[in-house]
Amino acid sequence: MVKDQKRWRLLRDFKKGKYCFLIGVDNWSIELKKSEFYSLYILILRLNEQLSNVKNQLMDEESITLEIEQLPWYIELEGNKNEWDLRFVFESQESTRSFEMYWPIPIAQTLFYEIKKMWESMD
């Protein structure tokens, strides 16, 4: 399964073996294991729930920052109730690799929902 847009890519290819998910934005990409992708999916669901809980209490121009930390991930949403970016820090529990990702407005919202759709389509 491939989602390939002008500024982002999302790929699922189980034939690749261990690192079967790819997320790319602008000039970078990272491959994730299925378990890493799943933990990312769970955290973006939690982040979406947090945003939904406060969205109606915010004025359009009011700034918001939401953070979730659950190893191996740290995720930060920053923006307002309608537009936001996402920053991710991944610290491998196996001490094999670490990385950071940044998804700017409007790529963040699009990838957020595409990851959700991709994982849920595997059921």
Image (tube, rainbow, N blue to C red):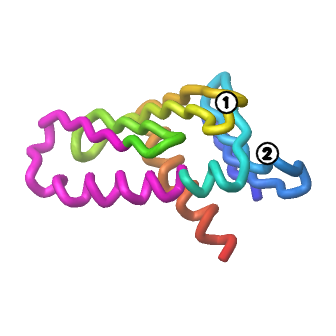
Residue placed most toward the observer, 49 or 18: 18
In the image, 108 versus 88, the foreground residue is 88
User: Can residue 114 be seen by looking at this rendering?
Assistant: no
Circle 1 is placed at which residue position?
95
Horizontal relation, residue 15 to residue 73: left or right: right
Q: Quadrant of residue 9?
A: top right
Magenta span contains residue 54: yes
**SS type, badge 1:** loop
Looking at the image, which residue is at 62% across and 35% down? 92
User: Residue 69: x percent and y percent?
Assistant: 39, 41
Residue 15, quarter of the rendered image: bottom right
What residue did someone put label 2 on?
19
**Mark 2 residue crowding within 10 angstroms, few (<14) / some (14–19) / many (20+):** some
Residue 19, x across and y down, in percent:
79, 45
Residue drawn at point x = 69 percent, y = 71 percent: 122
Q: Is residue 103 visible?
A: yes
Q: Which residues are magenta?
A: 40-68
Asked if marks 2 and 1 touch (Cβ < 8 Å), the reply is no
Check residue 93 for magenta coloring: no
Count of picture labels: 2
The C terminus lies in quadrant: bottom right
Q: Amino acid at mark 2?
A: Tyr
Earlier-in-chain disc, 2 versus 1: 2
Left or right: 90 as drawn, with respect to 27: left
Q: Position of residue 90 (x, y in %)?
A: 55, 34
Give percent across and percent down for residue 33.
Answer: 72, 48
Q: Quadrant of the N terminus?
A: bottom right
Measuring 16% from the left and 54% from the top, which residue is drawn there?
54
